[in-house]
Image (spheres, grey):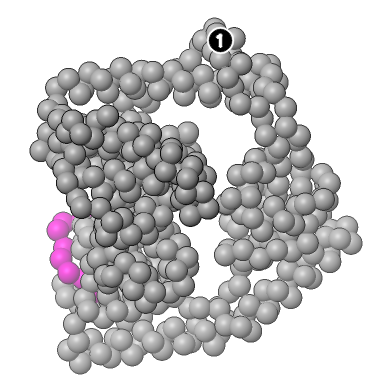
């Protein structure tokens, strides 16, 4: 993942907060148009919402520190306006260049962030009560935001993909910018072994039976779209009545694809099991080698007994590791994190401050742990982890040779930012942009 994609992921992650604050501000602001970009308008409520979002990202909380927030918020509003204008410019350029967002990426981010919002507020009913609208409308609004962010990122990546930096440019960057470069914060290099609670036989049978009952309702004449919106646990397609859209062979997992491509138009499948759960699939239309299908997904949920089994397993693995078992071999045999299983559970190097924000449970159990030692098992939303601290580095200043890779990335980003600004300024000369004078100050 390149640096622009990492920035995008952070931005999309904060969209949950953006949406959750929009309802508050919409009641406080008498909306008005403050800028026009081509045929798009920018509202004052958008500027305030995005300014609030940026303030939160910088750790400025209006509840904890209202006086500082009021003092600093004007600059966030100005930056917000500039960013929103730039965003519209990017979207215009994306349209000219026929750049579209990948629908599967949109679906992935939508699913991840909807789950985050539901967890944050404590259930879909509480989400609907908070926003004053049903889940379908919330997902639609969120989907539009994610799609725009992905298109903007695609425009930037396309235009800046071929920029490189020479060794001389890196050295010049470090020489001229070294006084302003932030020192390296405390970092930890960690690996993990993950045990995720798995749905047992009883939970699996319960999920399968639920889908069988839904299938019986469909055969009795119930509306597929309505049942999908009410029951499907695929948030990306549920809002569209289960419809996935036209896809080709290879876009689905094998078990789903074999059944889907064998159906006739409007034919309903039997219950299909994939790695994601149980599906009912209905063919809508076939166009050559592409099909449009809709589905209802029911995911087996681990029971309390399943959860207890995961706890017992992680405790047993921890005891074996404490007794001298090889960590890498245990990860390869027992870890449920497929992405790190073949690398000995390697998660990477993280700033402690960053880890405190994104995985505070890890920070807590790593306190006092020395390199080479194991932390006691800890639970997160993904399951139960055994962490190994590979290395810990104290805060220090950057050094050109020792930190060459890091400085090279910073120099590249600096060059990209400068080239990008030049390119953006040139595009703006070709687009009608009007800013209302009362908001420009």
Nearer to the camera, 383 or 149: 149
Horizontally, is 386 left or right of 257 in the view? right
Q: Residue at x 20, y 52 (%)?
A: 30
| Number of numbered markers | 1
Q: Is residue 288 magenta?
A: yes
State the extent of the magenta-drawn residues as a range.
280-289
Q: Is residue 373 magenta?
A: no
Residue furthest left in the image = 39
Give the camera-side residue of 67 and 11: 67
Whether residue 320 is situated above or below residue 53 in the rendered picture: below
Q: Residue furthest right?
A: 323
Q: In the rendering, at what x and y percent does residue 154 appear? A: 32, 36
- Please give the residue where the numbered disc 1 appears in the rendered image: 176
**Residue drawn where x is 61% and y is 54% of the image:** 359
Give the residue at x 67% y 47%: 346
Quadrant of the image occupied by residue 41: top left
- Overall secondary structure of the magenta stretch? strand
Quadrant location of the C terminus in the rendered image: top left
Q: Nearer the viewer, residue 57 or 252?
A: 57
**Residue 42's quadrant in the figure?**
top left
Question: What's the residue at 43%, 59% (across, down)?
Answer: 112
**Residue 311 coordinates in the image, percent (x, y):** 70, 74
Above/below status of 236 relative to 54: below
Up-down: is 437 above or below 25?
Answer: above
Is any part of residue 78 visible from this angle? yes
Residue 130 point in image, percent of width and height:
35, 69
Name the spot of residue 305 as percent of width and height, x first.
Answer: 63, 84
Q: Is residue 253 visible?
A: no
Which secondary structure, mark 1?
helix
Viewer-nearest residue: 435 or 15: 435
Q: Is residue 121 above or below residue 161?
A: below
């Amino acid at each position: 993942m390149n640096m622009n994609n990492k920035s995008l992921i952070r931005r999309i992650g904060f969209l949950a907060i953006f949406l959750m604050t929009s309802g508050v501000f919409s009641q406080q602001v008498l909306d008005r148009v403050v800028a026009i970009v081509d045929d798009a308008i920018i509202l004052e409520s958008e500027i305030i919402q995005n300014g609030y979002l940026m303030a939160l990202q910088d750790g400025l909380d209006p509840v904890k520190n209202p006086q500082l927030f009021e003092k600093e918020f004007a600059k966030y509003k100005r930056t917000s306006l500039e960013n929103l204008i730039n965003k519209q410019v990017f979207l215009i350029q994306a349209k000219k260049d026929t750049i579209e967002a990948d629908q599967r990426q949109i679906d992935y981010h939508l699913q991840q962030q909807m789950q985050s919002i539901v967890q944050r507020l404590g259930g879909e009913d509480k989400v609907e009560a908070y926003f004053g609208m049903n889940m379908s409308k919330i997902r639609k609004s969120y989907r539009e935001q994610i799609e725009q962010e992905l298109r903007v990122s695609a425009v930037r990546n396309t235009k800046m993909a071929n920029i490189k930096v020479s060794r001389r440019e890196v050295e010049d960057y470090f020489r001229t910018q070294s006084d302003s470069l932030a020192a390296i914060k405390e970092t930890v290099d960690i690996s993990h072994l993950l045990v995720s609670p798995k749905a047992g036989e009883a939970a699996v049978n319960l999920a399968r039976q639920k889908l069988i009952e839904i299938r019986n309702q469909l055969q009795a004449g119930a509306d597929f779209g309505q049942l999908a919106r009410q029951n499907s646990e695929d948030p990306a397609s549920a809002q569209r009545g289960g419809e996935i859209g036209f896809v080709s062979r290879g876009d689905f997992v094998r078990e789903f694809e074999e059944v889907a491509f064998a159906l006739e138009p409007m034919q309903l499948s039997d219950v299909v099991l994939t790695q994601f759960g149980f599906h009912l699939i209905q063919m809508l239309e076939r166009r050559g080698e592409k099909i449009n299908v809709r589905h209802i997904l029911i995911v087996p949920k681990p029971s309390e007994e399943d959860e207890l089994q995961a706890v017992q397993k992680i405790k047993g693995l921890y005891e074996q590791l404490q007794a001298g078992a090889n960590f890498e071999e245990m990860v390869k045999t027992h870890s449920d994190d497929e992405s790190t299983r073949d690398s000995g559970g390697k998660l990477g190097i993280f700033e402690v401050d960053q880890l405190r924000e994104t995985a505070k449970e890890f920070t807590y159990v790593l306190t006092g742990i020395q390199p080479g030692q194991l932390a006691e098992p800890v639970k997160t939303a993904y399951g139960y982890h055994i962490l190994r601290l590979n290395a810990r580095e104290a805060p220090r200043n950057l050094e050109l040779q020792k930190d060459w890779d890091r400085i090279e990335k910073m120099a590249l980003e600096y060059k990209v930012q400068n080239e990008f600004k030049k390119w953006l300024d040139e595009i703006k000369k070709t687009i009608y942009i009007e800013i209302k004078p009362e908001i420009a100050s």
